Image (tube, grey):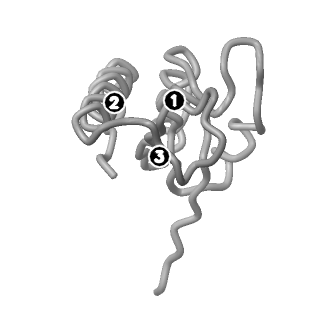
Amino acid sequence: MPTVDLNSDIAEGFGAYTCGDDEAMLGIVTSCNVACGFHAGDPLRSWRAHSRAKARNAHAARIRAFPTSGVSTPARIPFSTGEIERLVAYQVALRKALASYAGHEDRFT
């Protein structure tokens, strides 16, 4: 029987700012992409998202992003190749640790 992976970006708020209804989305998706910070997401929100995704058997990947403050257009990223590598490594390591802390497998995407 064919299946469909219903996916959603979650954990995109930061601090007191909430964006979307992660709990409702996790009630219907089979996988999710957890925000990794810089433009959205924070450690508590990410840990909570991984914990809830695990409880609902939803696979989780991560959304990587660049710091966007002051950047006028996404087409112009003011970072060198080496800086981008370090920004991605930072986000991958942090979210892998938070997923592990929540007891959830974090898929690299």
Which residue: 50% across, 78% down?
3
Q: Residue 67 carries which label?
A: 1
Residue 100 percent across, percent down from the top left: 30, 25
- Decide: is 75 above or below 69: below
Q: Quadrant of residue 40?
A: top right
Which residue: 47% across, 43% down?
77
Residue 10 percent across, percent down from the top left: 61, 40
> Mark 2–mark 1 contact, CB under 8 Å?
yes
Q: In front: 67, or 24?
A: 67
Read off the residue under disc 2: 87
Question: Along the polypeptide, which appears first: circle 1 or circle 3?
Answer: 3
Q: In this view, does 108 lie to the left or right of 11?
A: left
Read off the residue under disc 3: 57
Residue 60 percent across, percent down from the top left: 43, 45
Element type at mark 3: loop
Q: In 3D space, how far apart are the residues under numbered discs 1 and 3 (Cα atoms)?
A: 31 Å
Q: Looking at the image, is mark 1 or mark 3 nearer the viewer?
A: 1
Q: Looking at the image, is mark 3 or mark 2 nearer the viewer?
A: 2
Q: In front: 88, or 83?
A: 83
Q: How crowded is mark 1: few (under 14 residues within 10 Å), some or many (20 or more)?
A: some
Which residue: 69% across, 47% down?
25
